[in-house]
Image: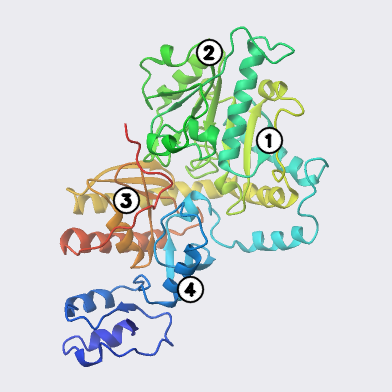
Amino acid sequence: MAIRHGSRSLLSKLNNPPWHILGIPLSRRNASAVAVPTSTSPEISYQNIAKEASLTNADPPSDSATAAQLRQHASYMVATYVRPPPLMIKGEGCYLYDAENRRYLDFTAGIAVNSLGHCDPEMTKLIAQQAGTLIHASNLYNNPWTGELSKLLVTKTVASGAMHSAAKVFVSNSGSEANEAAIKFARKVGKIRCGLSSTGHTTNPKHEIVSFHNSFHGRTLGSLSATPNPKYQAPFSPLIPGFKYGTYNSIDNLDSLITLNTAGVLVEPIQGEGGVNIATTQFLKALRNRCNEVGAVLVYDEIQCGLSRTGTLWAHANLPKEAHPDILTAAKALGNGFPIGATIVSEEVANCVVTGDHGTTFGGNPLACRLAHYIFSRLSDPALQSSVLRKEKTFVSGLRRLQERFPDQIGEIRGRGLILGLQMSTDPSPIITACRERGLLVITCGTNTLRFVPPLVISEAEIEQGLRILETAMEAIFEQKEEVEGTKGQGEMLPEER
């Protein structure tokens, strides 16, 4: 049984706890009040009631209406994710609200998706307007927005100092699809460069795709083949042949890793799921140089780190042209929650792709493209990018204070802009729970790493507010030694096991 009671009212009675009412259900009319799990069991403790009453957003108890609804839903859903108890029903700006009207400051942005925040007003208007005009007609016909979005992606990318050879765009529905297109395009280029025959065969086919350990490129069969985590690959083996894996940021043995049989090299300038690991300029330049030597295509996956999350339009924008890619993939923030992906290619790559080589039913539909045109225009604004760099300083400064307070538990701070990682010495999943139950959403990545990817429109005051909650959560676990059950599944993938 669970009762609900305002935290102040309950705390006022804790010095003389009303044990006689513990088995009596109270009114649930205050649905937004603190959830206080209780029981008629004699093991219930006064300390536990005090602890629960101090939590502004205690998880809904197992006998709550929320839990009952989730159990009903679970019986019809494939169990591909482990989710915590709250049921999110509304978003606004940098906040999410659950079914019990409790507010959560969102440091996750839907895993680096909602860069303009939740339910951006102009985006909401455009959805309604375009939905009343034209949603889908298929790629058998032209529509104005696929071309306009492609033009904007190319011109803004080149103007930003990133991928100087950007020329054409293939629009799809997701990051995995964007990477699938990149893999196919790289293999097609490899066949052309080796002399593709009329039957599609070559005497020395360039078919190998090189990616790197701790990378994450998606869950479709091709993108999963490029994601070298045995835990996730093994259930679906055999995967697509021809994939090789190297060590991120290591230039040793590149000659044997990337050979004349290599069609493409796929790499994240910043590994998001892998632990917020930043590629060095030396590493990316070495990849570009080796690709040039063997005639391979260099692909940058900026699905998580791109679109101004680092304070520049693309994470590689500050690199010299000698380190630029031939293909650039994007998704996530491009739709701010609406499904869309994009594969930006050079003229040489585009010239190797002909009608029938690739396609999509829904990709490039006018609704998604009109929204992405607006979103990309916002995200490419230099003023927004400058604000990201200012907010990075506020965020990192706060993380350093935590590092000083908890030196045995907190290690390295990694990242750029508003894609940041905090290395913990132990499993951080209890911190995830403690933060959520205090009104802050945080996720994990890599091995024992807290990941912070808030909306880019977050204010510095909201960052400071979230850091205070994070500090309180850490204090409860590290100093007060509260026993908090960890929240599992708060990242796309578990650490790679090698």
| Rendered residue at 19%/64% (across/down) | 482
Residue type marked 3 = Ser
Q: Residue at x 47, y 15 (%)?
A: 258
Q: Secondary structure at mark 1?
A: strand
Query: Which mark is first along the chain, 1 or 2?
Result: 1
Residue 399 percent across, percent down from the top left: 30, 51
Of labels 1 and 3, earlier in sequence is: 1
The reply to whether dot 2 and dot 1 touch (C-beta < 8 Å) is no
Left or right placement of residue 72 versus residue 172 in this view: left
Q: CA distance from mark 2 to mark 4?
A: 54 Å
Residue type at mark 4 is Ala
N-terminal-most mark, 4 or 1:
4
Q: Earlier in the sequence, mark 3 or mark 2?
A: 2
Q: Which residue is mark 1?
A: 170
Label 2 and label 1: CA atoms lie apart by 25 Å
Give the CA distance from mark 1 to mark 3.
40 Å
In front: label 3 or label 4:
4
Does dot 2 land on a helix, a strand or a loop?
loop
For this orientation, the residue located farthest to the right is 141
Disc 1 residue type?
Phe
What number is the disc on residue 99?
4
Tag 2 residue: 261
Residue 220 relative to residue 483: left or right: right
Residue under label 3, please give it: 397
In the image, residue 186 above or below residue 102: above
Distance in Å between CA atoms under marks 3 and 4 = 34 Å
Q: Residue furthest top?
A: 203
The nearer-to-camera label among 3 and 2 is: 2
